[in-house]
């Protein structure tokens, strides 16, 4: 299974999110963090991610006669390179977007189901808006956002930090010139 197929699955996306920020976790830890995912499903997806090189074993310990593995995310393997993205078909993009939205919805529902969930106090936001941009302006905006996010991407887990899922989505909602044709 290639990297694209490995990453474009809702459960596997959520597993990678749980391991972001340099965290090392066991499968039991993942089960606690993703209680809505059946254990057998979670173990199967962790196995696929490990076999595919997305996860690596950081440590192994014997616990009650069994080997407990501690996994870490290989950041270099979680990116879809531009050539692979360019080679994706429209159906591949449709599948990828659906997987990302399913993972996002599942993660948001899991957040709301937690004791003490308080969207206003937790800074939850899901605003949408339309920007009129040329291709060059869109490229510039995307670069600015990447730079902005990279400035914080190296942050490690700490007592005063919580992981926040950021999910910018860009796509044109109409063909260039279409609005003029409709008038």
Image: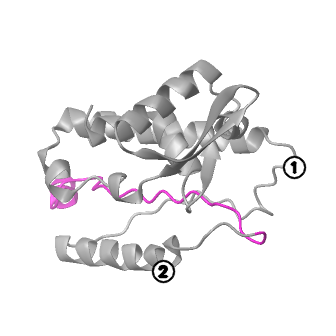
Q: Which mark is residue 151?
A: 2
Left or right relative to 157: residue 73: left
Q: Is residue 163 magenta?
A: yes
**What residue do we see at 31% from left, 33% from top?**
95
Q: Is residue 142 magenta?
A: no
Q: Position of residue 28 (x, y in %)?
A: 69, 34
Element type at marker 1? loop
**What residue do we see at 68% from left, 59% from top?**
124
Left or right relative to 34: residue 81: left
- Residue 151 lies, with reference to residue 66, above or below; the image says below
Q: What segment carries the magenta color?
A: 159-183
Mark 1, Cα crowd under 10 Å, few <14 / some 14-19 / many 20+, is few
- Is the magenta region chiefly helix, strand or loop? loop
Residue 135 picture quarter = bottom left
Distance from the alpha carbon under mark 1 to that under mark 2: 30 Å
The residue pinned by badge 1 equals 116
Residue 20 visible in the picture? yes
């Amino acid at each position: 299974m290639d990297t694209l197929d490995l990453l474009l699955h809702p459960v596997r996306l959520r597993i990678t999110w749980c391991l972001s920020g340099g965290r090392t976790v066991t499968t039991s830890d993942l089960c606690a963090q993703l209680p809505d995912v059946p254990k057998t499903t979670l173990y199967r997806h962790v196995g696929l991610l490990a076999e595919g090189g997305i996860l690596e074993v950081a440590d192994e310990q014997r616990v009650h006669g069994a080997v407990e593995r501690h996994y870490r995310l290989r950041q270099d393997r979680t990116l879809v390179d531009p050539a692979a993205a360019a080679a994706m078909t429209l159906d591949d993009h449709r599948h990828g977007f659906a997987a990302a939205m399913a993972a996002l919805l599942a993660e948001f529902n899991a957040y709301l189901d937690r004791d003490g969930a308080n969207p206003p106090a937790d800074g939850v936001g899901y605003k949408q808006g339309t920007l009129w941009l040329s291709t060059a302006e869109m490229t510039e905006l995307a670069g600015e956002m990447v730079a902005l996010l990279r400035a914080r991407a190296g942050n490690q887990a700490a007592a005063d930090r919580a992981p926040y899922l950021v999910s910018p989505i860009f796509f044109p909602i109409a063909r260039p010139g279409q609005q003029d044709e409709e008038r």
